[in-house]
Image (spheres, helix red, strand yellow):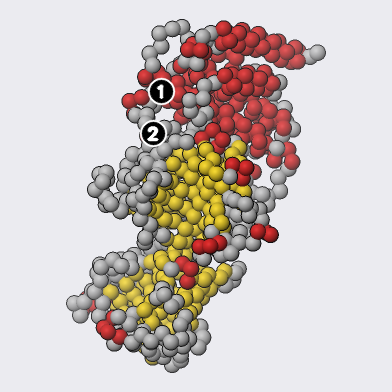
Amino acid sequence: MTIHEMRVALQRLVLLVLLVSDFLQLCTSTPVLAFNNRSSLNLAFMRIGTSRSRLMEAARAAGVTNLVQLKDMICKSELESVDLGLSASHTFLSSGKSEEAVRELLAVDNSLDTCMKNFMGDEEEEISTRIHQLRPIFEKIRHSVSSAVDLIDRSSRRSAVEPQESKNLEINPRLFQSVGSADQTVVDEVADETLLAMADDDGPRSWGPQEESRSASTNSFSMKHLPLPPAIPSIMDEMMNVDYCSPHVELYGATATIRMDSSCGGKFHSRSKYSSGVFSVRMKPPQGASGASSSFYISSNDENPDLISFDFIGNHPNRILTSYAVHGKYSGTLQTFSMEFDTTAKLHDYTIKWDAESVIWMVDNRVLRTLRSSSQVQDLDSDYPRKPGHVYGYLWDASDMNWAGKINWADGPFEMVYADLRTTSPLAVGQWHPPPAAPDPSAAASGFHHVPVPLQPIVIDYCGSNIDIQDSENHHEFSILFDSLGCGGRIKSLAKYSTGMFSGKVKCADGDTSGLLTSLYISSGEGNPLQDEIDFEFLGDNKGIVQTNFYVNGVGGHEQWIDLGFDCSQGFHTYAIHYNTHSIQWFVDSKLVRTVSRSEQVKLQDSFPVKRMRMYASVWNASGVENGAWTGPWRGDDLPFVAKFSDLTIQSPLP
């Protein structure tokens, strides 16, 4: 036996003696002593010690002998942060600095998450078998860290509300000091699992949702000092209850899976209820599941519920639906997004931020939608969700609803996956802000003359079932149908632009379209009475012309009609609006057909658009405007009408 082996054997013997001694003390203590404030801290010490030893286990799995070699192999800075963070959290906890210990542990988890995403998150990347084996070990470390944070939180809450009158159970901190060898793993894992089995069950062991009834006065460290949202995933089987079809709902670790076949789907909800917070989860709706509807939402689940949701429908795998309800009223709250990716292909990050000021829906750290409250005072805002609610996951057969398609059970069973749910609650106004917007991928080094990029994602304002979007690698086409129910449709860009070239191909609807209006335009805010707007408008009673116009602060009156020289319904033609601080230019098939300069408007003592604009396309019945004098009287004999759009692009900014 070498000197190193003798040293390790002696360290293991000392650790075992200390563990048995403390374990016997735990067994002979009264329940009050065994599960008091100090016991929670002892368990937290144990989780930290286990995490440190598992780092050595990771080194061994990677085929190296120590942590230094593992750092040289992958994630050097992240693993250095993990190693230092675990040591610092142990030191802080030993000196009674719970808040500092928690902050270090959250940083540890964030570093591990970064490492896993950068080096093990891409399934298409070639990763050696040894490196790939580190994922489950890192997940174990994250779960141990998560449990330690919750135990510290639990101890802090007890300290605030329960005076300690009796002698606390003590476990020697030397148990949790790393011996620098993977051989310690066995000792730590035995101790960890033994004490975990004795831990009380008055709350989840992960850093996840806690009952909101606890007030700031009973929490020794303020949530506002913690990173938002927390980087530590919650343990699904500890924080969720299954509503129905329990054999179809699997809750395991940080993952929940709902499986649907012809017998049923499934639903689960959080045990805790929330009145505000940041709720982030990774999701993958079922593939090839036309007719299925799946959701992640917050609901008060009463007779007239308040609700905030993400929804997915099987016949449109590129679409993400966002909606909310107030006192059971859903009308007019749906907004749909057609994304540049297939939501069913892999996991994506979805976030709902909800406080007294606003609701924000985010996907992959990109803000899709913001709903603002008109009042931060309870009951003074009837159009804003305020009731406390549970978090839900749901998969069901929506074939009978007509908007999700028809399901084919031969393609089943279908699975909806939820992973790494992160929750921060309660949330004060101003405590959390979305990350900065990503740089425009089309940006050139000069900052000007960006290349045109496709209009993606597409925001669908209304009548989403009438909008059919077809995407391919080099082609982007969609149609808007005007049906017998009087519904057409409108789409827009997600972002606003201060300047740009806004271009697209348009083919007007066939048939007698008198009264119908088809538009391609930019606007600072459709429906806002003070909007700026610049238009191409195709009037249904004359397909040989297009109307150009612009509005400033809601005031138009700048119409000019362009003779196209062709029937706009007979084929695609390209229409473009060039807009900057100096002029507006309208182009048809690359030919300049109209120019309005700012300097000329000043000479005429007239106004000029200056607001940031979104790109829009729409189809609607405008026969009611001026009693049909604008677009013609409505006849509708050739319904339904279908207008087609192709290759909508935005080139911004422009000089």
Rendered image: mark on residue 157: 1
Residue identified by numbered label 2: 212
Q: Give the number of the mark in front: 1 or 2.
A: 2
Which residue is the extreme one toward the bottom? Answer: 565
User: Taking 14 as reference, is 221 above or below it?
Assistant: below
Residue at coordinates 57% horizontally, 19% vertically from top-left?
Answer: 198
Q: In the displayed structure, does residue 594 sit left or right of residue 366?
A: left
Residue located at (41% from left, 81% from top):
587
Q: Is residue 273 visible?
A: yes
Q: Are marks 1 and 2 in contact (CB under 8 Å)?
A: no
What is the x, y in percent for residue 405?
56, 65
- Looking at the rendered structure, the secondary structure element under dot 2 is loop
Q: Could you say where residue 449 lies in the image, as x and y percent from the top left? A: 45, 68
The residue sitting at 61% across, 45% down in the picture is 248
* In this rendering, position of residue 194 left or right of residue 365: right
Separation of marks 1 and 2 at Cα, in angstroms: 13 Å
Quadrant of the drawing holding the N terminus:
top right
Query: Is residue 505 visible from the viewing direction of this image?
Result: no
Q: Is residue 639 above or below residue 240?
A: below
Which x, y percent locates residue 418? 56, 45
Whichever of callouts 1 and 2 sits on the residue coming sooner in the sequence is 1
**Label number found at residue 138:** none
Residue 420, quarter of the rendered image: top right
**In-front residue for pair 5/252:** 252
Foreground residue among 411 and 572: 411
